Image: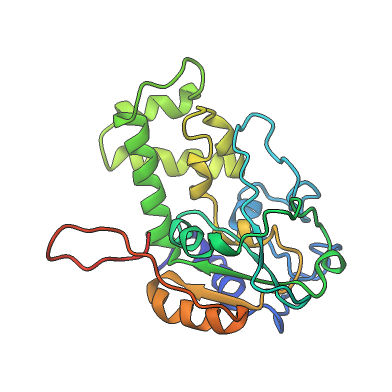
Amino acid sequence: EDFWEKRSGQTVAVSARGVDFEHAHTGWCSRSRFVVPSQEDIFTRADHCSDRHVLGVKEFSASRCANNYGRLLRTCASSNCSFYWMEIPSSGSSSMEAMLHNFFDADAPPLNASSTEEVEGLRAFAFVRHPVARFVGAYQRTVQYLTQGPPSRPGCVAPELQNLTSLMEPERFRRFVELFVERGPGIVELYSCPETPCLLFGLLSQVWFLNLWPGPLSFIGHVESFGEGVQELAGLIGAELRVPMKKRRKGMRPRPT
């Protein structure tokens, strides 16, 4: 429980419904009162929100990841049927995409927004996961790709990241966490392999992703109670949603991916 997002008070930002959320970081972000210091901001000792950490802006020059981590949805022809899904990797994002893809507004251009005024009237939602389970899962996936995945193209894995693969656990995990604390969000620039360009983004905190949305969130669901959250989300967006299930071995319960 004593982990980054919890220890620094990030659960307040993650768990709040958004509309009525007020935070104590007065003056932290002049363009939006809903943007709060993420754990990565704490790592880098930032004293205000970044003007590059906004929807539609490529924040990391060395990263090949082209995911905007958000999609506009339209559930009917009416003007009040537009919604925005804030995607958070390693928090049920594969299941969410499978469940929502029929509602993606393919004709809508990518949303560029940095202030609350620019998204006024557009209802947004997200799903989050327990931060410890999420980080450990993303770490395990990273190690799996680095040690068991296809051969990486020369130069697409930085030496300081590649060198960790020769270590044994738990030393490898300890050194990896130290590297993450040292680099902050810049850790994603240590990996630019084109086959899985967004691999390291799953390590970044959920508040880091939520801060891409400069307005309030109408709904935040939790992966640990995914089915219940999907039912509540269906009521919000006025659409029938079915939970996609990942195939599991016989005798094991399916779970959201």
Q: How many marks?
A: 0
Q: Residue at x 29, y 31 (%)?
A: 148
* Left or right, residue 229 beside residue 209: left
Q: Residue at x 26, y 58 (%)?
A: 247
Considering every residue shown, the one lying at the far front of the view is: 77
Report x, y in % for residue 125.
62, 71
Residue 170's place in the image compared with 159, above or below, is below
Q: Quadrant of residue 188?
A: top right
Residue 53's place in the image compared with 166, above or below, is below
Q: Looking at the rendering, in which quadrant would you find the N terminus?
A: bottom left
| Display colour scheme | rainbow
Q: Quadrant of residue 84?
A: bottom right
Report x, y in % for residue 219.
60, 77
Q: Residue at x 50, y 54 (%)?
A: 89
Q: Looking at the rendering, in which quadrant would you find the C terminus?
A: bottom left
Considering every residue shown, the one lying at the far top of the view is: 154
* Left or right, residue 163 beside residue 33: left
Task: Compare residues 104 and 136 and report the one nearer the observer.
Answer: 104
* Left or right, residue 109 beside residue 91: right
Q: Residue at x 47, y 35 (%)?
A: 196
Considering every residue shown, the one lying at the far left of the view is: 251
Report x, y in % for residue 68.
65, 48
Residue 16's place in the image compared with 138, above or below, is below
Residue 94's place in the image compared with 129, above or below, is above
* Left or right, residue 239 beside residue 3: right
Task: Compare residues 9 and 158 and report the one nearer the observer.
Answer: 158
Report x, y in % for residue 138.
41, 49
